[in-house]
Image (spheres, rainbow, N blue to C red):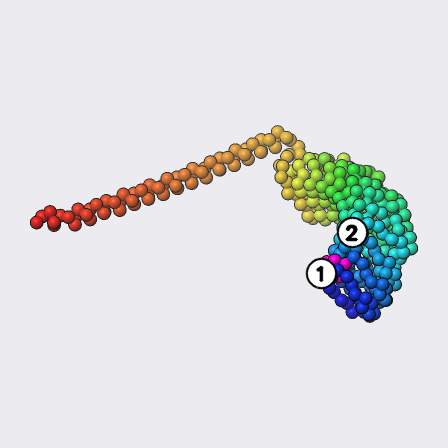
Amino acid sequence: MFRSWPNAQISALPDSIGNLTKITEMYLTGNQISSVPSTFSSLKTLKVLGLASNIFTEIPSDIIGLTALEDLDMSSNAITTIPTGITKLKVLALQHNSIGDFANLCKDNKLTVLRLDDNNMTAIPDCVSDMKALELLTLSKNQISALPNMTPLANLKELVLSGNSFSSFPEGACSIPKLQTLDLALNTISSVPDSCAESKIVNLKLDQNNFATFPAALGQWTELKTLNLAHNNIDGVELTEDPTFAVMQDLDVSYNHLVCEAVEETFSGVRIVTCADYSQINIGSSSSTSSSQSSGAKSSESGSGLAWWIILLIVVGGLIVIGAFVILIIFCMCKQRRTTYEPINGR
């Protein structure tokens, strides 16, 4: 049994809500709720609760005490701290709040999914290593610049750290045993360390960073299937060792300073190579690039000039035709008048 009252302009919940003793799911997204009545603790069968986009400043104790609750969404509120005692939840969504720390979640919890994107995090607490059930952790759009020891997170499969303050590749991520997806987009990383050569990461996002050359170390990542390096400053691909890329299926190097033909040749074994370039800067020869750009510019100018001449001739020709037509009409009118007046003059 579930109930849903989204965007219903609710500002307060009635005490009678505690009478819904058989409810398993409740959604109150997009209202103006800031608290729950004490009778809320009577919802002993409630498993899923959606309270996103309200005006909560804290997670009420009457919610924390719900023994059957497994999935809580309180994203897009005004929450600043996470209380202790959250031990039963499996999924917790708290993105788009103002939370600065989640250390109170570390002990005695069953969380498999934790979403804390767009908060006020400057660091990940060391005790995160105790959250051994975690499978997905998202921390994008914070101010995190380093990782603590996360090797004990034996079940973590996806880690999202995009839009943070990483200036160097977090080597600790490479030692997370089952990590498959690592998102480091929108940081200021410029290289990948050789120490990560044994990484088992499958999907890696490094778009919108500060790479000037293709990170050669990635050529030794034997499990890497998807790699995104779009929107960097890469102007060359120099792989010093024989790259493995044994299982790579999708490579995106769009919007760098690369010639796509050269990229496709280098990564000919990759099934999908996305390379939408805007600069046309040649990897091997800047002079040939300049020449190519120059001849392209001249060709463009020539084509543009010819188009203008054609338009001009069409306009002039049209004016001549119109002028001739007007003259013909005037001539006919004059002739008609002369014919009309001749009999009168003959009397």
Q: Secondary structure at mark 2?
A: loop
Q: Is residue 196 visible?
A: no
Q: Nearer the viewer, residue 81 or 160?
A: 81
Which mark identifies residue 284? none
Task: Return the x and y of residue 261 as percentages of the image width and height.
Answer: 64, 40
Task: Return the x and y of residue 228 as percentages of the image width and height.
Answer: 72, 45
Q: How many angstroms separate mark 1 from mark 2 (CA)?
A: 18 Å
Task: Return the x and y of residue 21 as percentages of the image width and height.
Answer: 83, 69
Q: Residue at x 19, y 47 (%)?
A: 337
Magenta span of residues: 28-33
Mark nearer the N terminus (1 vs 2): 1
Q: Residue at x 70, y 39 (%)?
A: 232
- Kind of residue indicated by mark 2: Ala
Q: Quadrant of the N terminus?
A: bottom right
Q: Residue at x 87, y 43 (%)?
A: 148
Is residue 322 rendered to the left or right of residue 112?
Answer: left
**The image quarter in which residue 25 lies:** bottom right
Q: Nearer the viewer, residue 63 or 206?
A: 63
**The image quarter in which residue 325 lies:** top left
Neighbours of disc 2 within 10 Å: few (<14), some (14-19), many (20+)? some
Q: Nearer the viewer, residue 1 or 14?
A: 14
Above or below for 315 versus 18: above
Task: Return the x and y of residue 34 as percentages of the image width and height.
Answer: 78, 57
Q: Is residue 159 magenta?
A: no
Q: Residue at x 80, y 45 (%)?
A: 120
Across the whole image, how many numbered discs are drawn on residues?
A: 2
- Kind of residue indicated by mark 1: Gln
* Residue that numbered label 2 is attached to: 78
* Residue that numbered label 1 is attached to: 9
